[in-house]
Amino acid sequence: CGTTWHAAGLVGQTRATRNATRMSRYGIDLYAALERETGLATGWKQCGSLNVASTPERLVSMRRQMARAKSFGIEFEFVSPADAGQRVPIMRTDDLTGAVWIPGDGKANPTDLTQSLAKGARMHGVTIVEGVKVTGVATSARRVAGVQWKSAADEGAIACETIVNCGGQWARAFGRLAGVTLAAAAEDPHGSRLQAPAHLGADIGVGVPAHPHAVVGLVDEEKGDGASPLVTVDLELRV
């Protein structure tokens, strides 16, 4: 629910449901082709992701998750800790119990991708209006009938049959305008800027570790080629 410029741009395929997985995979196909369609770069790199476990319990959980992913048609491969270390040399592997490699995952540049999506939408007849606030939702027979809007210079109403709530951390408040209660809450993420250990050299690539309760990212701002895999761990990045 943060702003585009500070989004990580990570694009993974594994989701809890079949429909969510299909949407994610559709996004990957779209990002890969969008630059050709719009002429605007998206920064899409299919660098793959490496999910690693540091406990036997976590490895069991990963095997269950990937069994579900297999039924969704996702390509993956379980690899040894040693192989994980070869893919991401910056990471310690002596305390890992296993890892899974998902070659179809990747990352994009959030700002470039947003602009490319917007241009593609306009090319297909979409009108994007900025600097406007939706102040109310009109309903009829318990269905959406339109929205009220207000800008710095004007206000008015638009009749419609469908509204897509993309309000991010304000989605719950926006839902109330239509009398809908959403189970949503804002999170407060934290970021750290780190320097790579000198003994690993300059060409160490990019690692993006995460666990169920927090996300930590390492971004090589000088290299920035997006060729290195994403790394997902259950606890922390070990160097």
Image (spheres, helix red, strand yellow):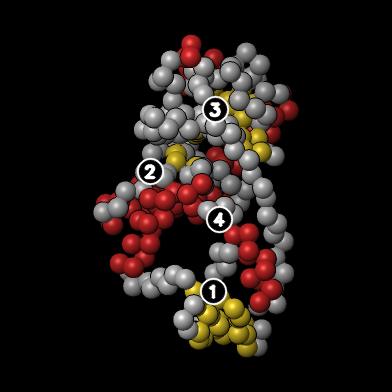
Q: Secondary structure at mark 1?
A: strand
Identify the residue under disc 3: 194
Q: Residues within 10 Å of mark 3 (few under 14, many from 20)?
A: few
**Distance CA(mark 2)–CA(mark 1):** 31 Å
Of callouts 1 and 3, the N-terminal one? 1
Of callouts 4 and 3, the N-terminal one? 4
| Residue at 57%, 68% in the rendered image | 165
Given the current orientation, which residue lies at the most extreme top position?
199
Task: Report the quarter where the N terminus lies.
Answer: bottom right
Q: Is residue 221 above or below residue 204?
A: below
Q: Is residue 24 above or below residue 212?
A: below
Identify the residue under disc 1: 133
Q: Residue 92: horizontal and vertical position, in percent?
A: 58, 17
Identify the residue under disc 2: 44
Identify the residue under disc 4: 19
Residue 88 in sight here = yes
Which three-letter amino acid code belongs to the residue tagged 4? Answer: Asn
Q: Place residue 173 in its image quadrant.
A: bottom right
Q: Residue 116: horizontal and vertical position, in percent?
A: 35, 56
**Distance CA(mark 1)–CA(mark 3):** 38 Å
